[in-house]
Image (spheres, rainbow, N blue to C red):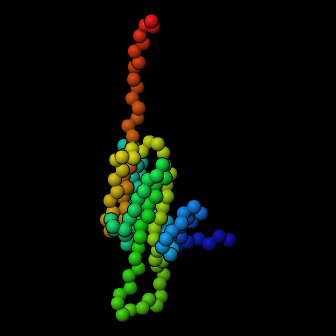
Amino acid sequence: MAERKREGQKQEAGLPDRVEHTRAGRFYNPDVDIIEKKDNITVVADMAGVDEKSVDITLEKNILTIHGRIEPEIPEKMKLVYSEYGVGDYQRVFTLSGEIDRERIEAKVKNGVLTLVMPKSEAPKAKKITVKPGD
């Protein structure tokens, strides 16, 4: 019988074999909402503990990679005795279609929530081609 995760529990990322990391530790898939509007696609990712300095977003070819780094914090003179919350970096990878205007993508992070707005490219407009007489 398959084991089900509790709602709200982080899921460890299954990273592709071709990805190599220089930091040891766990990677988690942040939960995301993807909202499509007429003129853009918005991705909202729950990445508790990240800020604008600890998030990297790259777009190479059609692959969009979101990576958030987390530094575990334990107060001075204290020792972690028990933990139910997994600490680790976040990583999520998406394949984008050609309808995204790559030059106008915007990202903001506030209170551990990353909002990525990806405007859609303008649809090609119909064009009348004038026919000229041949020589």
Q: Position of residue 39 (x, y in %)?
A: 36, 43
> Which corner quadrant of the image does residue 130 belong to?
top left
Residue at the image point whose x is 40% and y is 62% from the top: 56
Q: Is residue 104 above or below residue 24?
A: above
User: Relative to the observer, which residue lies in front, 83 or 129?
Assistant: 129
Q: Is residue 121 above or below residue 30?
A: above
Q: Position of residue 107 (x, y in %)?
A: 34, 57
User: Relative to the observer, which residue lies in front, 89 or 120?
Assistant: 89
All told, the count of numbered labels is 0
Q: Is residue 14 above or below residue 105?
A: below
Q: Position of residue 98 (x, y in %)?
A: 46, 42
Q: Is residue 13 left or right of residue 55?
A: right
> Which corner quadrant of the image does residue 50 belong to?
bottom left
Residue at the image point whose x is 37% and y is 62% from the top: 114
Q: Is residue 73 left or right of residue 20?
A: left
Could you tell me which quadrant the C terminus lies in? Answer: top left
Q: Looking at this rendering, what residue extends furthest in the bottom direction?
A: 77
Q: Is residue 11 visible?
A: no
Could you tell me which quadrant the N terminus lies in? Answer: bottom right
Q: Looking at this rendering, what residue extends furthest in the front direction?
A: 135
Q: Position of residue 7 (x, y in %)?
A: 50, 70
Residue at the image point whose x is 48% and y is 61% from the top: 92
Residue at the image point whose x is 38% and y is 65% from the top: 55
Q: Is residue 4 visible?
A: yes
